[in-house]
Amino acid sequence: QVQLLESGGGLVQAGGSLRLSCVASGSGFSLNTMGWYRQAPGKERELVASVTSGGSTNYADSVKGRFFISRDNTKSTVYLQMNSLKPEDTAVYFCNADATRYGRRNYWGQGTQVTVSS
Protein backbone atom coordinates (compact mmCIF):
# COMPACT_ATOMS: atom_id res chain seq x y z
CA GLN A 1 0.00 0.00 0.00
CA VAL A 2 3.04 2.26 -0.45
CA GLN A 3 2.83 4.14 -3.73
CA LEU A 4 5.79 5.66 -5.58
CA LEU A 5 5.42 8.43 -8.15
CA GLU A 6 8.33 9.57 -10.34
CA SER A 7 8.64 12.89 -12.13
CA GLY A 8 11.26 14.96 -13.92
CA GLY A 9 11.98 12.88 -17.01
CA GLY A 10 12.16 14.37 -20.46
CA LEU A 11 14.20 14.98 -23.59
CA VAL A 12 17.62 16.62 -23.27
CA GLN A 13 20.71 17.03 -25.40
CA ALA A 14 23.97 15.28 -24.60
CA GLY A 15 25.82 17.15 -21.88
CA GLY A 16 22.62 18.44 -20.30
CA SER A 17 21.11 17.77 -16.89
CA LEU A 18 17.88 16.50 -15.39
CA ARG A 19 16.66 15.92 -11.86
CA LEU A 20 14.30 13.06 -11.15
CA SER A 21 12.06 12.99 -8.10
CA CYS A 22 10.18 10.15 -6.47
CA VAL A 23 7.69 10.68 -3.66
CA ALA A 24 6.37 7.84 -1.51
CA SER A 25 2.81 8.09 -0.26
CA GLY A 26 0.61 6.05 2.02
CA SER A 27 0.28 5.58 5.74
CA GLY A 28 1.87 3.61 8.50
CA PHE A 29 5.16 2.87 6.72
CA SER A 30 8.86 3.48 7.19
CA LEU A 31 11.29 3.86 4.29
CA ASN A 32 14.55 1.98 4.32
CA THR A 33 16.89 1.89 1.31
CA MET A 34 15.64 3.73 -1.77
CA GLY A 35 17.09 3.60 -5.25
CA TRP A 36 16.84 4.28 -8.94
CA TYR A 37 16.92 1.65 -11.67
CA ARG A 38 16.79 2.05 -15.43
CA GLN A 39 15.86 -0.10 -18.38
CA ALA A 40 16.90 0.68 -21.94
CA PRO A 41 15.24 -0.88 -25.01
CA GLY A 42 16.34 -4.48 -25.41
CA LYS A 43 18.20 -4.52 -22.10
CA GLU A 44 17.44 -5.72 -18.60
CA ARG A 45 16.70 -3.41 -15.71
CA GLU A 46 19.85 -2.30 -13.89
CA LEU A 47 20.62 -0.51 -10.64
CA VAL A 48 21.75 3.08 -11.13
CA ALA A 49 22.06 4.38 -7.57
CA SER A 50 20.80 3.71 -4.07
CA VAL A 51 20.78 5.47 -0.73
CA THR A 52 20.20 3.95 2.70
CA SER A 53 18.12 5.45 5.47
CA GLY A 54 21.40 6.59 7.03
CA GLY A 55 22.51 8.38 3.87
CA SER A 56 25.09 5.92 2.51
CA THR A 57 25.13 5.85 -1.30
CA ASN A 58 26.11 3.43 -4.04
CA TYR A 59 26.41 4.07 -7.78
CA ALA A 60 26.83 2.06 -10.91
CA ASP A 61 30.29 2.53 -12.41
CA SER A 62 28.77 4.01 -15.56
CA VAL A 63 27.29 6.98 -13.68
CA LYS A 64 29.86 7.68 -10.97
CA GLY A 65 30.84 11.33 -10.91
CA ARG A 66 27.85 12.32 -13.05
CA PHE A 67 24.77 11.21 -11.13
CA PHE A 68 23.98 12.00 -7.50
CA ILE A 69 21.27 10.47 -5.33
CA SER A 70 19.80 12.12 -2.25
CA ARG A 71 16.72 11.91 -0.05
CA ASP A 72 14.51 14.10 2.08
CA ASN A 73 13.02 11.99 4.83
CA THR A 74 10.60 14.71 5.93
CA LYS A 75 9.03 14.59 2.45
CA SER A 76 9.48 10.85 1.85
CA THR A 77 11.23 11.76 -1.39
CA VAL A 78 14.33 10.53 -3.20
CA TYR A 79 16.07 12.48 -5.95
CA LEU A 80 18.45 11.64 -8.77
CA GLN A 81 20.48 14.55 -10.13
CA MET A 82 21.81 13.58 -13.56
CA ASN A 83 24.59 15.68 -15.09
CA SER A 84 26.69 15.36 -18.23
CA LEU A 85 24.06 13.13 -19.76
CA LYS A 86 25.04 10.78 -22.58
CA PRO A 87 22.91 9.08 -25.24
CA GLU A 88 23.57 5.76 -23.53
CA ASP A 89 21.72 7.09 -20.47
CA THR A 90 18.49 6.93 -22.47
CA ALA A 91 16.10 4.62 -20.62
CA VAL A 92 13.00 4.40 -18.50
CA TYR A 93 14.02 5.23 -14.94
CA PHE A 94 12.22 3.49 -12.08
CA CYS A 95 12.08 4.43 -8.43
CA ASN A 96 12.40 1.62 -5.90
CA ALA A 97 11.84 1.61 -2.17
CA ASP A 98 12.41 -0.93 0.55
CA ALA A 99 9.66 -0.13 3.04
CA THR A 100 8.22 -1.54 6.21
CA ARG A 101 4.45 -1.52 6.76
CA TYR A 102 3.17 -4.48 8.73
CA GLY A 103 6.04 -6.33 7.12
CA ARG A 104 9.00 -5.47 4.89
CA ARG A 105 8.78 -5.46 1.09
CA ASN A 106 9.90 -3.69 -2.08
CA TYR A 107 7.83 -1.20 -4.05
CA TRP A 108 8.23 0.14 -7.60
CA GLY A 109 7.11 3.27 -9.39
CA GLN A 110 5.76 3.17 -12.94
CA GLY A 111 8.84 4.82 -14.41
CA THR A 112 9.70 8.04 -16.19
CA GLN A 113 11.28 8.30 -19.65
CA VAL A 114 14.66 9.95 -20.06
CA THR A 115 15.86 10.51 -23.62
CA VAL A 116 19.27 11.99 -24.41
CA SER A 117 19.90 13.11 -27.97
CA SER A 118 23.34 13.39 -29.56
Image (cartoon, helix red, strand yellow):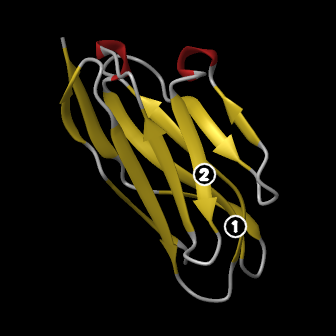
> Which residue corresponds to mark 1?
99
Q: Residue 86: name its quadrant.
A: top left
Which structural element holds mark 2?
A: strand
Q: Are marks 2 and 1 in contact (CB under 8 Å)?
A: no
Give the quarter of the image for residue 75.
bottom right
Q: Give the distance between the C-alpha atoms of the residues marked 2 and 1, in whole angstroms.
A: 17 Å
Left or right of 83: which side holds 117? Answer: left
Q: Nearer the viewer, residue 48 or 108?
A: 48
Say which residue appears at 45% left-offset and 60% top-offset: 22
46 w.r.t. 98: above or below:
above
- Coordinates of residue 56 in the picture (x, y in percent): 79, 46
Disc 1 crowd rating (10 Å Cα; few below 14, some 14-19, many 20+) is: some
Asked if residue 10 is positioned above or below residue 109 in the image, the reply reads above
Tell me the amino acid under the disc marked 1. Answer: Ala
Pick the quarter of the image with the C terminus: top left
Q: Say which of 39 and 61 sits in front.
A: 61
Classify residue 109 by image quadrant: bottom left
Q: To which residue does mark 2 refer?
A: 70
**Amino acid type of disc 2?**
Ser
